[in-house]
Amino acid sequence: MLIFDICGATHPGRVRKHNEDHILIGRFVKNSGQLALSFSGDDDFATAYGMLLCVADGIGGEAGGEMASRLTLTILDKAFYAVVNPDAEAIVPLLRQAADHANKHVREVAANGKEYADMGSTLSGICLMGGRYWVVNAGDSRVYRYRNGQLKPLSNDDTLAARAVRSGAMTFEQAAHSPDSHILTNYLGAADFSLAVDSGPALRDADCLLICSDGLYDMVDDDTLARCLEQFNASGVSCADQAGRLVALANERGGRDNISLILIMVCHEPG
Amino acid sequence: MSRDDDTPVTSRLEEGSDTAVTQRMPSPAGVTQRMAVDESVTRRLDPAPAVDDDQLAQQVTARLHDEAPLMSALQLQAGNQIADRYRVQAGPLGGISGEAEIYRCLDERTGSQVVVKLYRHDMAPKREVLKGLLGLNHPDIVSIKDYGSWTGRFYEAMEYCEGGSMADVMPFSEQRLREHIGQIINGLRYCHRQGIIHRDIKPNNLFFRDAACNESVLGDFGISSILDPDNEGVRVTQTAANLTLDYAAPELLDGHKVGPKTDYYSLGVTLIHLLLGYSPFRNMSNTDILVAHLRGRIDYPQHLSAEFEQLLRGLLQISPDNRWAYRQVHAWLRGQPVVRDDGSAWSEQQPPTTSTGYPGYPEARTSQQLAQALEHFDAARQLFRGDIRRWLFDQHDPALAERVEEIEENYTDDPQTGLQKLRFLLDPTLPLRIQQHEVYSLDDLLNLLTADDAAINESIAQLLFGGSLLAWMDTLNKVGNRQSLLEKVSLIREKLRYKDTGLALFALRCTLDPDQPLPLIRDIKLQHPGQIEVVLRKAPQAKKALAQRVMAGYFEQWLRAAQFPGWEEDVSFIRNCRIAYPNQEALLTRAIRWRFQPDQPFPFAGKGIGDPRKLAALIDADERSRKQGLKLLAGGWIRAWLVATGRLANPDVLDQVLWNPQSSEQSKLEAVLQLMDPELPSPQLSVKFTRINFGQLDAEQPRSKTIVIRNAGRGHLSGDLRLQDYDRGFTIDSSTIEGNETVIHLSASSLGMPENSRQQTTLSISSNGGDHTINLAYQVPRRQRQRELPDLQEIVLTFFQHVNPRYLITVGILLFFIINLTFCHDAGDIPF
């Protein structure tokens, strides 16, 4: 039986006054502080309803960004958990419908208010259910899987640069330094919003999943993130401490954007 | 060049946020921008007229927090008037898109019904397009009646189509769809001749003018572009994220020029959508849709007629040059041969096989080139990040990408092996490099293995244990039964990794060529295990070599690789022999000879014995023969013969007897004799007592009794004794029976037992000669109680502790007077 140790943390960073990010853990939507929990793979809530763990990074200015990311996660949460005992086969359409519902609300508010006219939000996360999980993504927040020192993005960035890389118009090197690397091609609030939902590769003992906004990975590159997780795991640092240290590291390196992350540590149940 | 020409792709909106692309870093004009650090506020570079209505935003926010229905208060109601002319009758039609609301209205000037599209505050269509279409009455195009601004919002009034959109009545049959294709392409041709590219052909934008759904018309030019005649096309500077990706032609996505044929590609996808009743890209992510367009991976409806499939393939050509347009579709409709624009015969072009370079090493454009280039960039990192898999999926072969994903998942703890595996996966034609040799086939490898060169063998062993050999073998397509071969080699790698390299290479050689013989000495080789006796008879000197092959594991690997009949049982037998009797070469060799020639006799007392019963009888004959039997049994010979030749129906029972650590060698032999000859008479247990009563038993006087256990039959009596209760004061000095006369001392003691009680239990004897029970008992007597006098000193001390000193003094004075009076009276003295 697998055990999931989870900790979500979100912080405005060192430059911005407001936190335009939100995180969703289970049914809690937060945009400050930390929240940790632990549950087993056969947990009755996670088995019956699924455990949603998401990061939303708002765009469209202080008010709009915060509103959009909050709206995204609260509507997603309500729409997703409105369905009791969904089949595993029904999870993908359910996630898409819930996200579409959230998108519709974001667009409605954006369409009728000057203050919120340009607002939108990224959405990245996972839905754990039984022994499986699904990775959801729209925008440039990310879901990573860490295993044996290797950090593997499970989500594909919806950015112009990523699109250019996939179509062959840019190399990785060019994309990394391109101003297009944060031009979103898909997000909640876009007319053609579409949530990518993929079944995640099977989890193993000692795997970690990391969901984060660009405020983390822009400050702490993937290689450093992998090294941090390797060191933390080797020295037995708790999930909550690891999340806290990653936020601190991003702040040490500038903290130029809001920093949000959810860390999920997977282990076999002792005994 | 005008601004529209610079950014035509985002031309749905005249100004401001004309694209769903949102930028977080400085970017070219025309996109919504969020400055990374110093300007976190959304900045419009070219603001559109907007409603100055902060209250509205507050109202929305408040409603949001109240979780009340959001939009109803913001929409126009029936009876409202737009631009002092259009009276709202119904709407918004089709919900709220976030870009515009659509209402059915009465044009109060003309009295006709119109549709009014009311754009959101900061959006507007291209005026050049509307100008071109205004007042036009074309049978296949929705006519634009009017446009303008109203309360800061742009509106567009157009012809009302009574039959609704084609999306409302799909799916279509091929036949019914065919009836409308002519009208649609006529509408497109007209637009294109006017220099207008529609760019948003989809089921929702194809309408029926009449309620009977006969007249189909093209509508909604919201994001249409004006062609630039100088450039013969529209240059796309950015990907248009707000166009509907499902219908987007490849040239819209990869930055190439768009033109009239862009609309025909969208028509192809639209036709599939109309036939299916749903988008062929439903449930696909934007990225996957993008890849599907760029790589020509669109699923066609099942049971499609060949004729319609040709139409769809023509419309969905990736290259606009080879894509069908009006001329080709028109010819198709009339059943005429389809020719290219240049008049040559049309033929389908397969999706491009050449790809763009790998983004981590752009010089590599094919998987083979990437295989050669792996050492020139950080390939391991990019492999495990999924970058290589993604490129393969997008640009080459999804099945190959899937196999790369297996490496990503399973080799994180061994990245170098994963990389080797990737190399051969990317280019299966790559040779395996062994020293100066390039190995292309298993035969090449076998030749190197049989050459028996130390350096080569060392290299092969490294490749085997490092995983590269398996990775290479995995790519050999021409090998029959590849999976089984891979499993065998994996097993060799796993089991022999830290053992003898020579053995591992021998196992590999036999696995690659199961006809390999087992070499013994010089020219003496075994082709088949059944030849052992023949070979040893001819060359007895090979016996030692055979023993060595067996001891070192070569024989076992040879059996395993060749898979002779019953090899699994044979391997298991040899393993058990080796574990049970380590380092006994002679025994192992003999066991193998018995195994593969079961009619071989067992040598005993100068005879060759074939029947286990006879052997049992000979061993049981006398003390000397039993001693000999004991020796053979302890050495493993009897077991080896019985098991190897299959003379025992159930060898497990034999092993249970032999591996019982409690049993003596004699008792094991007796049990084995019984197994060899079940009719052999058993020993017979003989015990004199059935009941022993010790009577009254004082604690100070324990008693004992001698019990003699005898064998009244043949063979070796063995067994054990057990007291049912150990807390009743009975003990025995031995709990085992060995031999034909065993003397046991039984003791009984009542020490600690409750007085006047009766203690009893049973002594159970179980043996190979039968079982017996003796009842044991004794009586604990009542003890005599003696009155104990208290110690004088204790009395004195107690007295002084408990008596008041004043009383003592008083008593002392009284005693003095009494004594004095008594004695003085006698003496006649007066005391005072």
Image: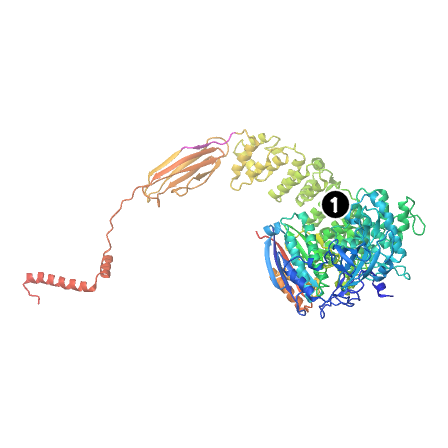
Residue A68 in view of the camera: yes
Taking the view exactly as shown, the residue that stands out farthest to the left is B828
Looking at the rendered structure, the secondary structure element under dot 1 is: helix
Q: Which amino acid does label 1 sit on?
A: Arg
**Which is more toward the observer, B548 or A174?**
A174
Left or right: residue B341 versus residue B748 is: right
Q: Which subunit holds the residue at mark 1?
A: B
Highlighted range, magenta? B681-689
**Which residue is depicted at the point 47% across and 36% down?**
B766
**Image quarter for residue B222?**
bottom right
**Image quarter for residue A107?**
bottom right
**Which is more toward the observer, B628 or A145?**
A145
Q: In this view, does B602 lie above or below B488?
A: above
Residue B475 at x, y percent in the picture: 77, 48
Residue B773 at x, y percent in the picture: 43, 34
The stretch drawn in magenta includes residue B724? no
- The rendered magenta stretch, by its main secondary structure, is classed as loop
Left or right: residue B705 versus residue B580 is: left
Q: How is the image coloured?
A: rainbow
Taking the view exactly as shown, the residue that stands out farthest to the right is B343
Q: Name the residue under label 1.
A: B509
Q: Is residue B606 above or below residue B514?
A: above
**Which is more toward the observer, B742 or B299?**
B299
Residue A171 at x, y percent in the picture: 79, 61
Residue B791 at x, y percent in the picture: 24, 55
Residue neighbourhood size for the residue with mark 1, other residues' Cα within 10 Å, grouped as few (<14), some (14–19), many (≥20): many
Residue A226 in view of the camera: no
Q: Is residue B46 above or below residue B245?
A: below
| Tag count | 1
